[in-house]
Image (tube, rainbow, N blue to C red):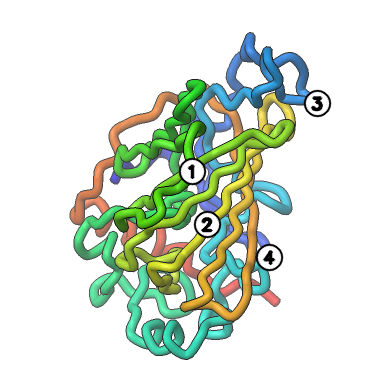
Amino acid sequence: MRIRIPVLIVILGTALAFSSPSSAQSAPPSAGVKSQKSGLASGGVPDLSGIWDPDFHGPEGIRLNTWDPSDPYAAHPENSPMTPWAAEKFKDVRPPFGAKQTFNDTNDPVQRYCDPPGVPRIYMYPWEITFIQTPKIVYILYEYTKVWRAVFMDRDHPKDPDTSWMGDSIGKYEGDTFVIDTVGFNDKTWLDQTGHPHSDALHVIERIRRLDHDRLQLSVTIDDPKAYTKTFSAAKVYKLTNAPMGETLCAYSEMKEFQEKVVDKTQTPPSK
């Protein structure tokens, strides 16, 4: 895990925001984007080019600890619409974030074992993403843990997909939006930073679109009938940046340092 220096943490009301000065710079315009309004490249395909850094400012830029829109900061994570099966599993989690936050005694599979965070939790980390668009496959590269995904544009899901950390992803373009449909997850990851579980029936829909030249919106919809009694969605915004993607490997020693220098000092209850 790479700790960006300086890291500016601002607690404003109920929002906990991270800001990196180097990441706040706007990148030069991309030749592929015809207009900021449409965000479409030639041929009507959305242009997702560039390096995107989470934007922790504004109404959609808040730091999310859960995908539950009724409790984005995980003040009451036990109130998420879990089935009895998921609620029982949630009783045993000891996450590094949210109301049940702990580090030394955590059983977070990422913090404790450096397991992949999976989808959609990987979007909750304050690191960059980028896209490589080809006609048959769109690749998503994540700065955090230096993992990547392949989103297949020319096929359906296998009838019986092998389960995996990142699932089986297929995609399509709907106007200015890149839509990703993912199934075939194992049940070893958490949905979020607070330990909400999911089953192997998890179905995730990601909708990614360029709001304008410098902003990218990610909307995540979660459907898991084994673990949740209803479908729910949340969104966050990324900013175009000049900052290059760096080495952000999972290392327990760096996670501990980040916890002590950043997380522990900012886990202050929001003012009422």
Whichever of callouts 4 and 3 sits on the residue coming sooner in the sequence is 4
| Residue matched to label 2 | 204
| Residue matched to label 3 | 37
Image point (76%, 23%), residue name: 36
- Nearest-to-viewer mark from 2 and 3: 2
Mark 1: secondary structure? loop
Q: Nearer the viewer, residue 97 or 171?
A: 171
| Residue matched to label 4 | 13
Mark 3: secondary structure? loop
- Nearest-to-viewer mark from 1 and 3: 1
Q: Within 10 Å of the Cα at label 1, are there few (<14), some (14-19), or many (20+) other Cα atoms?
A: few
Q: Is residue 152 left or right of residue 246?
A: right
Q: Nearer the viewer, residue 88 or 155?
A: 155
Q: Within 10 Å of the Cα at label 2, are there few (<14), some (14-19), or many (20+) other Cα atoms?
A: many
Image point (47%, 72%), residue name: 98
Contact, CB < 8 Å: mark 4 with mark 1? no
Contact, CB < 8 Å: mark 2 with mark 4? no
Q: CA distance from mark 4 to mark 3?
A: 32 Å
Q: Within 10 Å of the Cα at label 3, are there few (<14), some (14-19), or many (20+) other Cα atoms?
A: few
x and y, in percent, of residue 119 in the image: 43, 54
In the rendered structure, which amino acid carries the disc numbered 3?
Lys
Name the quadrant containing residue 232: bottom right
Whichever of callouts 2 and 1 sits on the residue coming sooner in the sequence is 1
x and y, in percent, of residue 150 in the image: 40, 36
Q: Is residue 70 left or right of residue 186?
A: right
Name the quadrant containing residue 101: bottom left
